[in-house]
Image: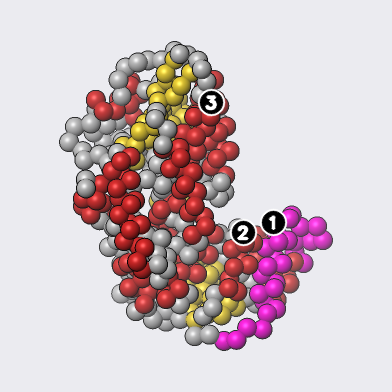
């Protein structure tokens, strides 16, 4: 029997699904020893620090991740960064294959004036802030204003707008970061605008996200009926299924006669941002529209227009992604997930994507190197293994139980390291 060693860099959904695909391809002749390496003290990637806290069902995929991690040939090395002291090239000497599953963590820029004003930030900062990501706990989120604007037309933009527009007590039974719940409870924001550059027929929201909006108990959702009717006309008599589903869901909201709440979520279509206005801080957004320029006064702007990969030394990048052909980067190096294809699809998309790349990887394998592993390259780093993560996980769940929450997340690296060492 041959044992092949595979290092997976990144412990998000794409990384776990890559590990699962390897486990599924084991046989009497071939097994895979998998070492998963994660820069943060905790695994699960966007399932922990990206999925909106008020969507707990999506997070149940973590049970699949735990089953994958229970395999005796799986090891976790968290709180360990690749690209500094330990290079990809050094790893390549130890492993039969390397899988990059680093995701896309940097927010794309609009490239318009005023984008760097206080009160203007990216969803790539705001989302991990309310999800207790250790590196974003101190992000300055300006909630001392009546109006906030979210720029973007995808599910991330929808999550951001919804988190700003809902009544904060709705977050009490969720695993939202404690510091974020406190900030939302003192927030002065009562109007949230979500703006899309193109018409509603081009919006990248998924219809389940739209259909959930009327369930917000304390927020009025306002969509202009004319915007949707015009979009239906432009979409033609036989629109694609997803487009029709989206437009039907938006039209239902536009036609509904809802009571007026203190908080309102407004949708703007065909609004192209030209500039973020202000001197000392954000004061508004200037848009170009089919009817001329329009200004929306606001004190907070969050852009959600896409992501690109944070680079690792020694790995080629282009257009925000790892340079690859069908997941192959170079000899023995592969890439999966958002780092491979860009920030598209839902969490489940990563399963088929990772499985396809792993099939190529396995087909490329010759004979095992048998040249050690990452433990020989680690020097002073405080690494968290699977049992350390299990202690963090158990402690967070225990802290949440008496408060009716799925967990209370620890935020700082020191706090997480302390829990891991119990």
Q: Which quadrant holds residue 270?
A: bottom right
Q: Earlier in the sequence, mark 2 or mark 1?
A: 2
Query: Where residue 242 is drawn, which disc sits there?
Result: 1
Disc 3 from disc 2: Cα separation:
33 Å
Q: Which residue lies furthest to the right in this view?
A: 237
Under circle 3, the secondary element is loop
Foreground mark, 1 or 3, reads 3
Query: Disc 2, disc 1: CB below 8 Å?
Result: yes
Residue range in magenta is 233-260
Disc 2 from disc 1: Cα separation:
8 Å
Seen at 61% across and 59% down, the residue is 206
Q: Which quadrant holds residue 312?
A: top left
Under circle 1, the secondary element is helix
Query: Where residue 25 is drawn, which disc sits there?
Result: 3
Query: Where residue 206 is drawn, which disc sits there?
Result: 2
Q: Main secondary structure of the magenta part?
A: helix
Q: Is residue 416 left or right of residue 215?
A: left
Total numbered labels placed on residues in the image: 3
């Amino acid at each position: 029997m041959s044992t092949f060693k595979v290092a997976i860099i990144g412990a998000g959904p794409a990384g776990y699904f890559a590990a699962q695909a390897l486990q599924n391809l084991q046989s009497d002749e071939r097994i895979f020893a998998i070492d998963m390496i994660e820069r943060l003290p905790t695994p699960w990637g966007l399932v922990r620090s990206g999925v909106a806290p008020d969507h707990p069902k999506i997070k149940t995929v973590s049970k699949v991740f735990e089953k994958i991690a229970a395999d005796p040939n799986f090891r976790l090395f968290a709180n360990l960064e690749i690209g500094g002291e330990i290079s990809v090239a050094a790893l390549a000497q130890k492993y039969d294959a390397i899988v990059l599953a680093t995701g896309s963590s940097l927010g794309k820029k609009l490239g318009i004036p005023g984008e760097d004003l206080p009160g203007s930030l990216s969803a790539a900062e705001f989302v991990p802030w309310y999800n207790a990501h250790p590196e974003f706990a101190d992000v300055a989120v300006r909630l001392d204003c009546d109006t906030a604007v979210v720029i973007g037309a995808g599910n991330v933009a929808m999550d951001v707008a919804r988190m700003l527009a809902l009544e904060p007590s709705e977050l009490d039974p969720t695993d939202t970061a404690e510091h974020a719940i406190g900030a939302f409870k003192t927030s002065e924001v009562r109007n949230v605008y979500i703006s899309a550059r193109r018409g509603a027929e081009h919006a990248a929201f998924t219809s389940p996200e739209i259909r959930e909006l009327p369930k917000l108990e304390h927020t009025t959702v306002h969509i202009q009926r004319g915007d949707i009717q015009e979009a239906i006309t432009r979409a033609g008599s036989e629109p694609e299924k997803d487009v029709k589903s989206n437009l039907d869901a938006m039209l239902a909201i536009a036609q509904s006669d809802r009571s007026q709440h203190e908080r309102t979520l407004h949708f703007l279509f065909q609004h192209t941002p030209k500039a973020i206005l202000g001197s000392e801080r954000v004061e508004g957004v200037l848009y170009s529209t089919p009817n001329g320029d329009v200004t929306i006064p606001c004190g907070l702007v969050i852009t959600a227009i896409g992501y690109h990969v944070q680079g690792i030394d020694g790995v080629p990048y282009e257009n925000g992604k790892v340079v690859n052909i069908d997941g192959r980067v170079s000899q023995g190096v592969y890439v999966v997930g958002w780092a491979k294809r860009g920030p598209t699809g839902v969490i489940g998309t990563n399963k088929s994507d990772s499985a396809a790349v792993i099939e190529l990887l396995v087909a490329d394998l010759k004979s095992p190197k048998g040249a050690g592993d990452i433990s020989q390259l680690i020097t002073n780093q405080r690494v968290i293994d699977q049992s350390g993560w299990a202690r963090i996980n158990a402690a967070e769940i225990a802290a949440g139980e008496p408060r009716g929450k799925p967990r209370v997340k620890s935020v700082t690296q020191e706090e997480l390291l302390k829990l891991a060492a119990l």
